[in-house]
Amino acid sequence: MIIEAVKRTLERTPPELAADIIDRGIMLAGGGALLKGLDTLISHETGIVVHVAADPLSCVVLGTGRVLENFKQLERVFSGRSRNF
């Protein structure tokens, strides 16, 4: 199911972002990044290099904290619903 979700997401990705993903690869973060072999499987199934964050469990919460600290500057990247945050 994870692989199918990744493939669907890549299919729906705008071309300019897809080009960046192909050039730089996919970064796995969070608890799912710790699933043994997931990075290799995603890379094999998509043909895209996959990286695992150095500290996948902490990077999600640290990134969320940075977004909250800079919410006004980043507000334009959120959908209409998120603007009511």
Image (spheres, rainbow, N blue to C red):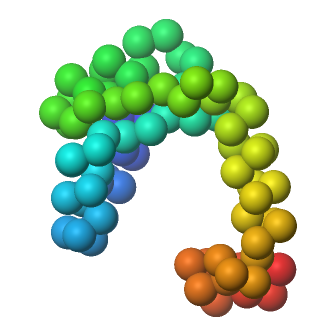
Query: Can residue 16 be spotted in the picture?
Result: yes
Relative image position of residue 37 (x, y in whole percent): 41, 12
Q: Answer above or below: position of 55 versus 77.
A: above
Query: Can residue 4 be spotted in the picture?
Result: no
Q: Quadrant of the C terminus?
A: bottom right
Whether residue 58 sits left or right of residue 44 in the image: it is right
**Picture residue at 59% right of the left edge, 86% below the top:** 76
Relative image position of residue 53 (x, y in whole percent): 54, 30
Q: Answer above or below: position of 6 versus 54.
A: below
Q: Residue 31's quadrant in the figure?
A: top right
Q: Residue 11's quadrant in the figure?
A: bottom left
| Total count of labels | 0
**Picture residue at 26% right of the left edge, 31% below the top:** 49
Q: Nearer the viewer, residue 55 or 80?
A: 55
Q: Residue 16's quadrant in the figure?
A: bottom left
Q: Answer above or below: position of 81 versus 53.
A: below
Whether residue 38 sits left or right of residue 60 in the image: it is left
Whether residue 45 sits left or right of residue 61 in the image: it is left
**Picture residue at 73% right of the left edge, 64% below the top:** 67
Q: Quadrant of the N terminus?
A: top left
Whether residue 74 sits left or right of residue 42 in the image: it is right
Report the residue that reaches farthest toward the left.
47
**Picture residue at 34% right of the left edge, 30% below the top:** 50
